Image (cartoon, rainbow, N blue to C red):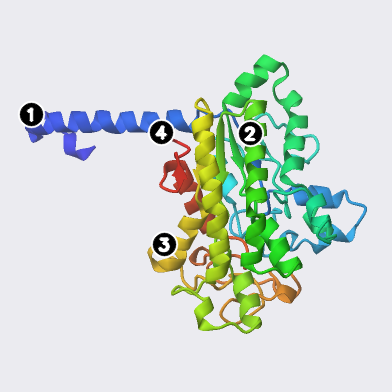
Amino acid sequence: MRFLRSSSCCSPLAAAFFFFFLVAVIGSTSSNLQQATKYNAMFSFGDSVAETGNICVVSSSSSNSTELEALTCTHPPYGTTNFGRPSCRWSDGRVVVDFIAQSLGLPLLPPSKSKGKDFRRGANMAITGATAMNFSFYQSLGIEDPVWNHGSLYMQIQWFTELIPSLCGTKQNCKEFLAKSLFLFGGFGGNDYNIQLLELGLTPEQTMKNTPIIVNATVNGIERLIALGAVHIVVPSILPTGCLPLFLALFVAGSSGESDFDQYGCLKSYNRLTEHHNSMLREQVQILQRKYKSTRVMYADYYSQVYKMVQQPQKFGFSNPFEACCGAGGGKYNFDVAARCGMPGATTACRDPSARLSWDGVHPTEAVNKMIADAWLNGPYCNPPILS
């Protein structure tokens, strides 16, 4: 504090200014600390974007011994940035839920399916392939691939319900415990559209007819959590599908015209689908906010923030916004379904993952995940912000 070495160096006005500045800083720091410690635990639900290990636990105990080996997230160079090894996360390092937990002074959330863990500080129900709709809905459409049947939204709530007695014991204790916990619910819906687009071969316009039931399943899930005692619930939207290297590479391979792309290079029809879903979800969250006055339901906007990064990559420190950091697809997108990140011949990542938006053509890099977490904690891409 060299600028206050002696009383003679400052005028009374300057000294007064410094006093009020110091009070403001201390007050702000105290307020931020109070906000960051107000949650006793955190519980997360979702798909591979929020995965922290459930798919590996389930696959390792599966009768199908090859399933775990087939998971490319268990192979290098996944996890190289933060963990130094694959951690069953679909990124080079931490995911959004990790950064939020750390910012709140909580441990990294253990996967809920793991054995012998203490979940009283939190658990993660998210699992790769998760959908908003139950698998029976997709079976009725002719889908049998088990990758989509590891844990739907409904199943994840069941897992959480089964955990509750070990978390807090009595009904009154659980009411107080859950009221002081943070819930991250989603985003759900991405895989519901992936199934329709990739497995059923539907167009984005055709899939929109199922958007109302997908969003309704999410809303029903939120209300189930509220009925269980949740008070603080973050509801994320889904990522801009039309900007993902996966869809860009597949679409270009199918011969597309320039009119199919927006001025930034994203597929317009696929982003319209995502915008349609997110708009409907946001409207429903606003209805829930009015319906449950004593509950904080927060809408977290994945789409707008990531799309802004695509529009102005240099502003955020990124280059080549559509090129996957890890993979052996080559070309503009560096994505090939047969040469995905972690597969033989695709075990070397780009030199600097923090300068890329996409890690593997589908999931964000750790650098992006950190920016998203910060914007949800403090705004402007979460309404209201988690720490407000």
Instruction: State left or right for residue 225 relative to residue 318.
Output: right
- For the residue marked with disc 1, what is the amino acid? Pro
Circle on res. 374? none
Between discs 4 and 2, the one toward the N terminus: 4
- For the residue marked with disc 4, what is the amino acid? Asn
Rounded to the nearest whole Å, what is the CA distance between mark 1 and mark 2? 57 Å
- Compare residues 212 and 258 and report the one nearer the observer: 212
Residue that label 3 marks = 316
- For the residue marked with disc 2, what is the amino acid? Glu
Which secondary structure, mark 1? helix
- For the residue marked with disc 3, what is the amino acid? Phe
Q: Looking at the rendering, in which quadrant would you find the N terminus?
A: top left
Rounded to the nearest whole Å, what is the CA distance between mark 4 and mark 2? 29 Å
Rounded to the nearest whole Å, what is the CA distance between mark 3 and mark 2? 36 Å
- Compare residues 325 and 163 and report the one nearer the observer: 163
Q: Quadrant of residue 86?
A: bottom right
Vertical position of residue 126 compared to residue 48: above or below: above
Residue at position x 68%, y 54% in the image: 48
Residue that label 1 marks = 12
Q: Where is residue 382 shown, x and y percent of the image?
A: 46, 44
Q: Are marks 1 and 4 in contact (CB under 8 Å)?
A: no
Q: Quadrant of residue 315?
A: bottom left
Between discs 3 and 2, the one toward the N terminus: 2
Between discs 1 and 3, the one toward the N terminus: 1
Residue that label 2 marks = 223
Vertical position of residue 81 compared to residue 217: above or below: below
Vertical position of residue 67 compared to residue 10: above or below: below
Residue that label 4 marks = 32
Q: Where is residue 160 shown, x and y percent of the image?
A: 73, 34
Rounded to the nearest whole Å, what is the CA distance between mark 1 and mark 4? 30 Å
Q: Mark 1 or mark 4: which is in front? A: 4
Q: Are marks 4 and 3 in contact (CB under 8 Å)?
A: no
